[in-house]
Amino acid sequence: MTYRVCFVCTGNICRSPMAESVFRARVDDAGLDGLIKVDSAGTGDWHEGENADPRALSVLEEHGYTLDHTARRFEPSWFARLDLVIALDSGHLEALRLLAPTEEDAAKVRLLRSYARSSPSHRSSTSAPPVPSSPDCGDLDVPDPYYGGRIGFEECLEMVEEASAGLLAAVRDDVEGRAT
């Protein structure tokens, strides 16, 4: 059975496509591409049908990542087919939980940086991090680089890369747990 992960930011042209690209590369490198499917979307439809921001694409390419992307909006019906919904900031976390049809679906929503080895929630547990509540998780946000310069995209990539290893470990545990 395929494990499905969707990364979500605001317009699906900066942070979530970058996270999708990095995590897909991690999944491929781990030889899990047949077991884990990676996707992304936005909480809004402002950029629906567009490619990723050129600055995001440039930074990804310079660091060896590829991305074939068309922006789209996250739909509540997707919860039924997704195993994990990864929010890029606390605003997305809250918006996605409000969209969730059930409490079980809301529990699928996690903040990406909660999987970073340096985050307090990751250090306290070897399995998937606890679901943080939005008032306490602002320090786990991946800031939106859209209105800034290239350095914001570089910093976004660093945060995404840092969290991807912990996320892959948690997803691998879930996949292996299902297989037993």
Image (cartoon, rainbow, N blue to C red):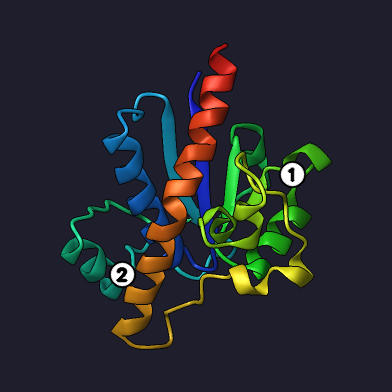
Kindly identify which numbered label has been placed on residue 107: 1
In this picture, is 46 found above or below 104? below
At x 42% / y 79%, what residue is drawn? 145
SS type, badge 1: loop
Residue 161 image position (x, y, % from top left): 38, 58
Query: Where in the figure is residue 144, as x and y percent of width and height?
Result: 49, 77
Q: Secondary structure at mark 2?
A: helix
Q: Nearer the viewer, residue 168 or 4?
A: 168
Q: Earlier in the sequence, mark 2 or mark 1?
A: 2
Residue at point 21% right, 70% down?
58
Residue furthest to the bottom in view is 148
Residue depicted at 75% across the width and 66% down the height: 134
Tell me the kind of residue under disc 2: Ala
According to the picture, the residue beneath numbered tag 2 turns out to be 56
User: Which marked residue is nearer to the observer: mark 2 or mark 1?
Assistant: 1
Q: Residues within 10 Å of mark 1 (few under 14, many from 20)?
A: some
